[in-house]
Structure formats: C-alpha cells, structure tokens
Amino acid sequence: MSYLKAREYLNSFINYERQNHYPYSSSFRLERARRLLQHLGSPQAALRAIHIAGTKGKGSTCAFVANVLKEAGFRVGLYTSPHLVDVRERIRVLPEEKIAKKDFSALIERIKPQAEKLRRTRLGSLSYYEILTALAFLYFKEKRCDFTVLETGIGGRLDATNVVSSLVCAIMPISYEHTRVLGNTLGKIAAEKAAIIKDKSQIVITAPQRPAALRVIRRRAKEIGAGLLEVGEDIRITRLKIELLGRHQIINATVAIGCLRALRCFGVKISPEAIKQGLKNTRWPGRLQVLSQRPKVILDAAHNRASASALKDALEKLFKFRKLILVFGVSQDKDVKGILKELAPQAARIILTKANSPRAMQPEMIKSFIKTNGRVVSSSGNPQQALKTARQSAGPKDLILVCGSLYLLGEVLKSERQ
C-alpha cells in the first residue's frame, strides 16, 4: 500500500477532531479499541507507559518526559495529538524522527483487515483516532521502545489511549473545555480526565489544580489505591533552564520531573544530568514559537481561557513591543468570549480568520464577541492572507500573535515552509 493510499484509507474513518456535534458515550468506546488491539496481538500490553491527561500543557509535558528519557539513553515512543502539519508528527520514536511513510503505510495495511471485520460487528466502525492509536501501539512495540509517553485526546475515560496500563500518569491543569461532552463543571471534567488513574500500582502526579478539580483527583487516587504526588506540595517548583517560553512551561517541566522521579518506584533511575539536558533540549512547536523577526511573529496554541491567560502573562513578561497585532481564529466549540477577554484588550489591531476546518468559527461570528474600543478589527479569508496583512501593517518593533486554533497554526506553518 502506498503512503497516499494509506492516508486515504485512514481519512475514510470518522474524525471527531473535525466534528462539531456527536454523542460522546457512543462515539468513544474503549471496547471497540480493545477489540481491534486484540486482533492485532494486544501490542499495548508490551508498553511501559507514562500517560498524561489534562486541559493544557499535555503535549509540552509529554515532550519534556520523552526528551529526558531519550537523554538517559532509552528508546522512547511519543504519541501526541493533534498534529500541526503532518499526521506522522503524532507518532515518534526518539532519538529518531516521526514515523517513516513506509512504516506508516505498512501498519495501515496490517490494520485494515481487522478494521473491516470490526465494521461488520455490533461495535461498528472505528474512528480515525482509534486507528491511529492502534498504529502507534504497534509501531512502538515493533521498535522495542523502552518507554512510551502518551497524550490523551479528549477527556481520558473513553480516550483510546486509556486501554493501556501505565506505570505513571499525570493530570495537567484542568479548566473548562469541551463542556458539551465532558460536563459543565470542573468536577465533571476532572472526573473524565482522572479516569486514567485505574491501577493501585500507578504513581499519579498532578499539576496545581483548582479546588474542585483537585478534590476529584484525590478521591479517584484514593479509591483506586494509587500513590498521588502533588506539584506545589510533594513536588516543589524550582528554577529550571528550559527553552520553551512562559512560566506555565516551568509547571509543565516540574510535572515531567515528577513523572521521571516516580519511575524510581519501578527500578528506573534518571540522572540529574539527563534531566537537566533533556529539559533544556526540548522543543515543542506552536507554544510561544517565534516564527520570524522584525516584525516578530509568534505562534501559540492557546485555545481556551486558561491558556490565553497564561499566554497574555508570558507576552507581558517575555517580550518588548510597540503594539500587538492579533491574528485570531477559533473552533466553534471553544470559549471564544473568554479567550478574547484575555487577549483582545492588549491588541491594537485584530485580524480575524478561519482555518480550513468544518469546526472553524466564521470571522463574522467571532467579531460579535469583540468590543472594538477604537481598535481596528478586520477579516481575512484564510490564515496565510491574514498573516500577510498583519505583516504589511506592522512596524519592525511590533509583535504579531497568531493563536486560537491548532488548525490555524498548522496552516500558517505549512505555508511558511513552502
């Protein structure tokens, strides 16, 4: 099977990342993912996993953990989502790069017969994400990874990655997201994410949380009998040398250190030097990523109010600029009002745009949430044109911020690389 045919087959399955409305409990079914993996020899059973859930900081924390383990001499599988430009970004084996096209195609070809069998059962057709998760597990097993680091997609309880039994799991800061499917309170959202805690032999690390979320995490860990370590209480935030910008990345790196130290309970000791070098060498695209200078262009994946607040603080502390030009696009299911409340007041000009996604909100709708207060608010048909307009209107000492959607960032990055 060619890579093109493999991509076409993968894209034939429903992709909930690009859907606005779907029934959560019936759309996400662990039984379906388990059955597929059973037919493939249960590769997840061979993995020594670190599993990370939460609202913000999951991807960066996964990258920190994986890079430190690589620095310590281990072969590490890294599974994250979504991707920015290429689907193969989601599946990596360090110290190597993303999965090769030939390996991706060969694994899709192996999965296809089993996926077709399932399509004819009561469990129904698999999803795009379930296929990719199975592919990642197969790949990591075949590459004989010493450890795998897994980022959950939506939630945790019904996420396809939750078929794995992890040694260590971490819950990153929880805030309001996907409220239509995960619940409209922090407690309900936390319960979905804390469901990756499911074995009394696990060690659980939690980032600092709001009280409602922390209560749920503590209760879940106690019910399961898993050991719980809390950043700020059991794990202290210290000064760390990292390349990723923003104070929130210090918290992410501290959670990563907690995960790595927890591996001691399983006979794995990581040297301080490996931790230091691994953290320092970690890069993660789309997180306060400086794309170009004069004018400075920054990309950030902030897509909820909590991450927008962290982004606002980071801009104020880390960058000096004359005026801020905001290039903004967002998905329909996001808290657009909350995000804009954090970022819009800082912007002298706002250029609204729309990624090529069925979930993307129309610029005209976004505009209804903005109080102009004398600032220029305009629209552009696509992200590439929006960034071009921003650059044309910016002075050399201005800062252009592109944010609101990973799809938006992906399209910008793809156009810049061409």
Image (spheres, rainbow, N blue to C red):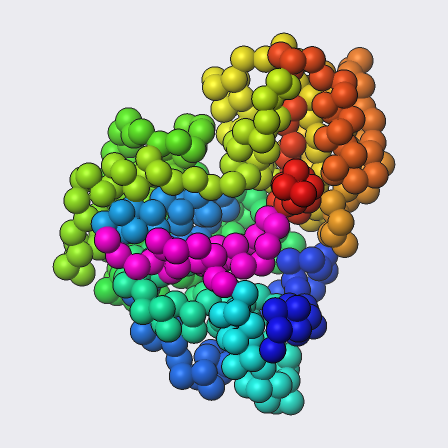
Q: Position of residue 267 (x, y in %)?
A: 14, 59
**At 81% from the left edge and 42% from the top edge, which residue is drawn?**
362
**At 28% from the left edge and 51% from the top edge, which residue is drawn?**
69
**At 74% from the left edge and 45% from the top edge, which residue is drawn?**
355
> Where does the C terminus fall, quadrant-wise?
top right
Q: Is 99 included in the stretch rendered in magenta? A: yes
From the viewer's perspective, is residue 121 above or below residue 205? Answer: below
Decide which of 21, 85 is in the foreground and name it: 85
Q: Say whether residue 55 is visible.
A: yes
Decide which of 405, 124 is in the foreground and name it: 405
Decide which of 370, 286 is in the foreground and name it: 286
> Where does the N terminus fall, quadrant-wise?
bottom right
Q: Position of residue 165 (x, y in %)?
A: 34, 68
From the viewer's perspective, is residue 95 above or below residue 35? Answer: above
Q: Is 79 included in the stretch rendered in magenta? A: yes
Task: Tell me the magenta residue range.
Answer: 73-100
To which quarter of the image does residue 293 belong?
top right
Q: Position of residue 410 (x, y in %)?
A: 64, 45
Q: Say whether residue 233 is visible.
A: no
